[in-house]
């Protein structure tokens, strides 16, 4: 056998001294393998390893109709929100012996559609989508149930009932953060709201209004600003910085600022520090998400933590349950999993003096 030749089951059979059928049963872990003596299996496996035998994935797929691969679609891989979710997805797929096939849509609709078709052409058994931004029409995924592709969306609540999804309790999270600022004595609070098209923006604002009404806290509309629509989630920092500069330029006084997400909060912090406003002594700042940068800033950022790694793991669990149900020819229920948010108090918030 030449050095570059592909090692086949026949090669392993010839070297080990067993029949092709016996070697095939052992190496493919077929049901009949349990009737083959341990010594025989060990000899075959040792020979296969010595020769460098690797199973043919195409042959395995044709035989079992299984690829043990799950597509992982990300809207924008540069968004710091994605990294911990991806870690949870990858670790869970690894533990289940599934291969993640990653595609980054760059927030481009045509790229999203093309990658989606490419993943399906490669016969992934399921699809996990990290829906971290807004420019791609997520309704393109609604058709996947008809095509019998187990699909789970992580990071964003969706408004159709044909796909499982995992998302944080945005209302409760925002309510908890405003309660924290109120408890510290803040009454003049600025708000940076998210882009209008995001459902999470409406949910967080609802939680804020609910708490404000419960304690008769007046929300000054002159202190409420909105992030612009954009395809780039990384522009949150720039938006937070510019919006805060505008508030300061117009002389609008506030003792605390609550931003839609951490990156906008960090941008706001830069604007305040540049103007000589001490954080948190003169102005407290809070965000939402708990991305890695939140703990690294100076001062470190008080925020609402989304359990992103756990959300990724939950998403994989849902998609693999759906895959198992499909393999057993039974229906799998559509599950919407809302996870709790957690207040993380760091250095950027302080009691009003």
Image (tube, grey):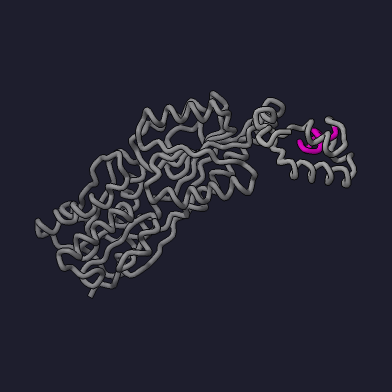
Q: Is residue 10 left or right of residue 61?
A: right
Task: Quadrant for residue 251, please give it.
Answer: bottom left
Left or right of residue 256: residue 18: right
- Looking at this view, is 8 or 3 the one in front? 3
Q: Residue at x 46, y 52 (%)?
A: 84
Magenta span: chief secondary structure: helix
Viewport quadrant of the N terminus = top right
As for residue 30 lying within the magenta part, the answer is yes
The residue depicted at 23 percent of the width and 51 percent of the height is 238
Q: Give the residues drawn in magenta, as a range.
A: 22-31
Hey, which quadrant is residue 197 in on the image? top left
In percent of width and height, residue 55 lies at 70, 35
Furthest residue toward bottom: 353
Task: Give coordinates of residue 60: x percent, y percent.
Answer: 69, 30
In this view, 280 is above or below 294: below
On the image, the x and y values in percent for residue 106 come to: 37, 37
Q: Is residue 248 magenta?
A: no
Q: State left or right for residue 54 relative to residue 186.
A: right
Q: Which quadrant is the C terminus positioned in?
A: bottom left
Q: Is residue 24 left or right of residue 187?
A: right
């Amino acid at each position: 056998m030449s050095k570059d030749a592909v090692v086949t089951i026949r090669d392993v059979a010839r070297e080990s001294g067993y029949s092709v059928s016996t070697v095939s049963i052992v190496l493919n872990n077929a049901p009949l393998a349990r009737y083959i003596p341990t010594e025989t299996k060990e000899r075959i496996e040792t020979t296969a390893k010595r020769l460098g035998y690797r199973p043919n994935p195409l042959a395995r797929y044709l035989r079992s109709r299984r690829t043990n691969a799950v597509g992982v679609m990300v809207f924008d891989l540069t968004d710091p929100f994605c990294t911990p979710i991806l870690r949870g997805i990858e670790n869970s797929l690894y533990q289940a012996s599934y291969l993640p096939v990653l595609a980054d849509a760059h927030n481009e609709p045509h790229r999203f559609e093309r990658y989606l078709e490419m993943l399906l052409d490669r016969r992934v058994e399921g699809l996990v989508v990290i829906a971290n931004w807004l420019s791609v029409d997520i309704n393109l995924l609604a058709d996947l149930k008809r095509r019998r592709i187990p699909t789970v969306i992580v990071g964003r609540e969706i408004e159709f009932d044909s796909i499982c999804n995992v998302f944080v309790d945005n209302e409760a999270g925002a309510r908890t953060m405003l309660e924290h600022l109120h408890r510290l004595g803040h009454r003049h609070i600025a708000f940076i709201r998210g882009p209008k098209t995001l459902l999470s923006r409406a949910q967080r604002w609802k939680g804020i209004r609910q708490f404000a009404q419960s304690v008769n806290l007046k929300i000054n509309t002159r202190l409420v600003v909105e992030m612009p629509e954009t395809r780039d989630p990384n522009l949150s920092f720039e938006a937070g910085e510019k919006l805060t500069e505008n508030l300061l330029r117009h002389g609008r006084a506030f003792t605390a600022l609550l931003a839609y997400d951490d990156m906008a909060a960090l941008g706001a912090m830069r604007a305040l520090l540049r103007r000589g406003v001490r954080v948190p002594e003169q102005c407290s700042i809070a965000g939402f998400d708990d991305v890695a940068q939140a703990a690294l800033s100076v001062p470190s950022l008080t925020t609402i933590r989304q359990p992103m790694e756990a959300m990724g793991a939950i998403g994989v669990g849902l998609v693999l349950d759906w895959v198992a149900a499909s393999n057993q020819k039974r229906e799998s229920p559509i599950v919407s999993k809302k996870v709790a948010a957690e207040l993380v108090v760091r250095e950027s918030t302080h009691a009003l003096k």
